[in-house]
Amino acid sequence: MAANSSSTGSKATSGTGGKPGPSAEQVVATFQKMRQEQRNMASKAAELEMDINEHSLVIDTLKEVDHSRKCFRLVGGVLVERTVKEVLPALENNKEQITKIVESLNTQMQTKGRELTEYRERYNIRLVGEGEGQGAGQSAAPSSRDSDGGGSKSGTGVLVS
């Protein structure tokens, strides 16, 4: 592992032109910011998925209704009166647009996930609780405390909660 930490250290310094790499606090702050961006994208995608489901319900309901029937639609906070014939195509178009946005967000989340993984590997970032279940079951937690507490083998590792 000593060789691994020296190669990680040289990657951090060579990428910035011989200058020392970012401090542990900067690495953690950047990592947390990237994780928050990914969470925000996931939250927005989930919200838009709910909108798609609502649009689907309304579209399915309106397809069974007479197209000349009166229909009310909320546009920009204002309730407007239209016919089903006018509203149905607009709803279908909105649903398609929202679906495209969700697909775009999912692609961005995958890209952000790859960036996060690369960043974690570059700076040897470990999350709290990570790796505890991979060892010898329940005895993994005390052993991880022992290995973290008594003389770290790699000086470039960062622990993120």
Image (cartoon, rainbow, N blue to C red):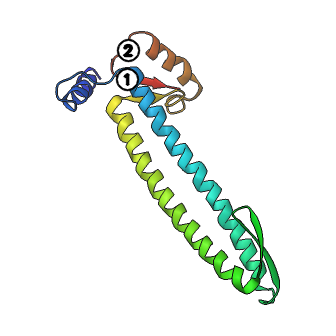
All told, the count of numbered labels is 2
Judged by depth in the image, the label closer to the viewer, 2 or 1, is: 1
Q: Is residue 4 left or right of residue 128?
A: left
Quadrant housing residue 88: bottom right
In the depicted structure, whether residue 26 falls above or below residue 83: above
Q: Which mark is residue 62?
A: none
Q: Which residue is mark 2?
A: 152
Residue 129 position, x and y percent, is 54, 28
Where disc 2 sits, the SS reads loop
Classify 10 Å Cα crowding around label 2: few (below 14), some (14-19), many (20 and above): few
Quadrant housing residue 10: top left
Residue at 72% over, 86% down: 85
In the depicted structure, whether residue 82 falls above or below residue 98: below
Query: Does the CB distance between marks 2 and 1 fall below 8 Å?
Result: yes
Label 2 to label 1: alpha-carbon separation: 9 Å
Quadrant housing residue 120: top left
Q: Is residue 85 left or right of residue 20?
A: right
Q: Which residue is mark 1?
A: 157
Residue placed most toward the observer, 90 or 41: 90
Amino acid on which disc 1 is placed: Gly
Residue 151 position, x and y percent, is 38, 10
Classify 10 Å Cα crowding around label 1: few (below 14), some (14-19), many (20 and above): some
Amino acid on which disc 2 is placed: Ser
Residue 113 position, x and y percent, is 44, 46
Where disc 1 sits, the SS reads loop
Residue at 67% over, 63% down: 51
Q: Is residue 24 left or right of residue 138?
A: left
Residue placed most toward the observer, 134 or 53: 53
